[in-house]
Image (tube, rainbow, N blue to C red):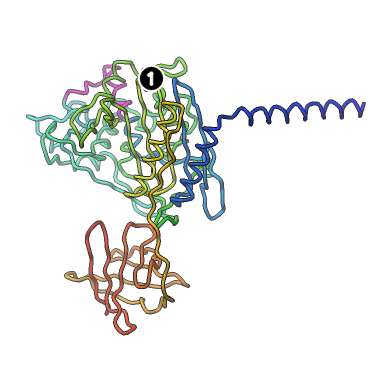
Amino acid sequence: MKNIAYSLFLLTFLLYTASCKKNRDTEKPIEKNIDKEIENWLSKTGIPSTSIVLFKNGNVLKSKAYGYSNLKTKTLANTSTIYNTGSNFKSVTATAIMQLEEKGLIDIDKPINTYLKEPIKYFNKNTPITARHLMSHQSGIPSSIGINKVWERKPNRTLREIVTAIKPTTKPDEKHIYSNDGYALLGLLIEDVTGLTYEEYIWKNILDPLGIETFGFLRPTPEMIEDLALPYHIRYNQAYPTNQLHLEQYPAGDIFLKPIDMAKFLMMHLNEGEISSTKILSKKSVEKMHLPNLEVEENFYYGLGFGIDQIDGKNYSYHQGSLPGYLSVFQIDFETKTGVYITSNVSSSPIQDKQINLLLKYLFEYVKNDNLKRDLEVPINKKTPVSRTIKLGNYIGKYKIEGAPVYLTIDKIGNQLFLINPAKERFRIESLNSNRFFITTENEDIEFKENKGNIESLKIFSMGKEINAKKE
């Protein structure tokens, strides 16, 4: 019996080994190239992790994660790793609004004040704002970003508190003004019309019917936290931990999902509002959402919850989403029923935006044409080696800001310098070269002025502006 059992075990093992070899042998070389290029992309950019989903005709062609969800513990990201979607979720909020119209609960072209329990007093009755204006960012409502730290002991404003203070700066239809507050208002509209919370409505009518299992997308459950990719910020190709933050205007995009979850939603749109025989939206509503409205910039428009990118005369639906510590992007093509969704645990910045959009273009070219015509470009921002020994104690002190009665403070804990701003927020700073430093969680640099070995002043470079402060 032992010999028979052993023989059966050996046969099973050999068959399994042969099967694995066959799978390796038949794996497309092009997919191996994609893996190699993405791993090279991560290495060069310093981005901790990325997760991609490629899909076509309702089928997932490739779903894979690369890099680390936690750099300190070297925890590898996987396809179940959860990221923040950022503004990509505006398309889900807009889909919910279109559902309400299909149910006869609202008309997206009637004044939104018609449906609110507490109408917005600053809205002009002669030029009413509609749900269509809000979805397409043509309401004239300026954008604000109410970001709070997850660990901060500070109460959030409610959606109603946010929207009651909204004051349009232009008439609707005059110009495109990207507005998070406009989407907060859409979230409140969903609540006032349905009697459900925003989270309840989105879950019951969109995410759950799509077969998504990430309940807790607005307030992550303890189990989700274990799968969460930690947020990082890149400075000079090196990743630094950054604060865990949340957005008060959450219907505008502060949602935690697996990459495959967003891909399912996008595939539903490509399939005329249906997925796995489940109807989420009508074909007519889907078509409305992906039509271009006012031009945002050359060859780029905005539909209803989706950006519309015009390339060589063709329209592609597109969106980028970000929250400090997270950056994601998608593009879909209705003609070929193809799409790409990419997410990562890194903050948005001009160079990171360029890096992830080049990766998007590279992968979208493959999923549409099943070939790769070029190597993946990877623009980087190198750090200059420090040319001398830095004596951290020289920088410690209070610095009075020029033209203002407030101070900046440079402090030291152990071997680490920190900048403390007038609001008493503490930011870690690292040496860039000689007397040039950078804030690890912000896109800001600091240059200290030295005279005969003593530090006299500092200058902060922030968003094209300079802040000068003299040491006391």
Percent position (x, y) of residue 123?
Answer: 13, 35
* Identity of the residue furthest to the front in this view: 373
Please name whichever residue, 23 or 233, is drawn nearer the observer in this view of the structure: 23
Count neighbours of disc 1 (C-alpha within 10 A) and say few if under 14, some if 14 to 19, many if 20 or more.
many
Please name whichever residue, 1 or 157, is drawn nearer the observer in this view of the structure: 1
* Identity of the residue furthest to the bottom in this view: 452
| Left or right side of 6 for 434 | left
Q: Is the C terminus in the top left, top right, bottom left or bottom right quadrant?
A: bottom left
Percent position (x, y) of residue 61?
Answer: 50, 27
| Residue bearing mark 1 | 280
Magenta stretch: includes residue 96? yes
Q: What range of the chain is rendered magenta?
A: 94-110
In the structure shown, which secondary structural element does the residue marked by tag 1 occupy? loop
* Identity of the residue furthest to the left in this view: 126
Callout 1 amino acid: Ile
In this picture, is 359 found above or below 266?
A: below
